[in-house]
């Protein structure tokens, strides 16, 4: 794809579509300097840290039109990606950024649709062994409605 070819593709887009393309380009550019992947940038993924009172690692993401499905609710795959990313971030915070880990198992119950605003996850470590870490995550919207809950198992690579 050349720049001229891209400009031709952009010519017949409406204002909303151009705004979406702009957000995607900005997310792509942020990945150059951020440790987050492109999809994490598109989710506006945030990791505020550990909440002593809740005894959980807190993560956030923003529901945007680009992440919604045809029913105008957050796509289930994006919810799953948010949960998996929150769990992975929790593992990094627990064992250190230099240790690699991968998801072995992820079981999600979708409880309510997410329509707008910020989602907040609380992730707890259930068991941390030498190679296996078991976690649970709950995701709520800004009105504190439970959107999803999940259990996951991560494997620590040597």
Image (spheres, rainbow, N blue to C red):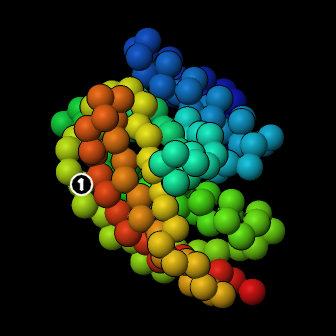
Give the position of the C terminus as an image quadrant.
bottom right
The quadrant of the picture occupied by the N terminus is: top right
Question: How busy is the neighbourhood of tag 1: few (under 14 within 10 Å), some, or many (20 plus)?
Answer: some
Q: Is residue 104 left or right of residue 33?
A: left
Residue 29: x percent and y percent? 72, 35
Residue at x 44%, y 12% (from the top left corner): 15
| Residue 12 or residue 55, whichever sits in front | 55
Residue holding disc 1:
110
Question: Compared to 31, does 23 lie above or below?
Answer: above
Q: Judge whether residue 117 can be spotted in this image.
A: yes
Which residue: 48% across, 57% down? Answer: 123
Left or right side of 144 for 106: right
Q: Please state which of residues 39 and 131 is positioned toward the viewer in this rendering.
A: 131
User: Which element carries disc 1, helix, strand or loop?
Assistant: strand
Residue 58 appears in the figure: no
Which of the pair 34/20 is nearer the observer?
Answer: 34
Residue 17, by quadrant, is top left
> In the rendering, at what x and y percent does residue 112 appear?
20, 44
Q: Position of residue 137 (x, y in %)?
A: 41, 58
Q: Position of residue 150 (x, y in %)?
A: 35, 63
The residue sitting at 48% across, 38% down in the picture is 61
Quadrant for residue 30, please give it: top right
**In the image, farthest residue toward the top:** 15
In this rendering, the answer to whether 114 lies above or below 56 is: above
Residue extending farthest front: 53
């Amino acid at each position: 794809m050349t720049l001229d070819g891209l400009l031709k593709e952009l010519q017949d887009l409406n204002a909303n579509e151009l705004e979406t393309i702009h957000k995607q380009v900005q997310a792509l550019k942020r990945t150059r300097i951020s440790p987050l992947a492109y999809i994490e940038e598109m989710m506006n993924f945030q990791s505020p840290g550990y909440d002593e009172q809740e005894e959980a690692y807190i993560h956030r993401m923003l529901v945007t039109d680009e992440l919604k499905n045809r029913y105008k609710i957050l796509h289930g795959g994006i919810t799953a990606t948010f949960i998996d990313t929150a769990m992975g971030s929790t593992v990094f915070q627990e064992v250190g950024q230099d240790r690699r880990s991968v998801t072995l198992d992820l079981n999600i119950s979708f409880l309510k649709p997410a329509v707008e605003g910020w989602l907040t996850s609380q992730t707890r470590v259930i068991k941390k062994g030498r190679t296996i870490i078991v976690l649970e995550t709950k995701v709520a919207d800004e009105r504190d409605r439970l959107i999803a809950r999940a259990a996951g198992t991560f494997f620590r690579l040597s």
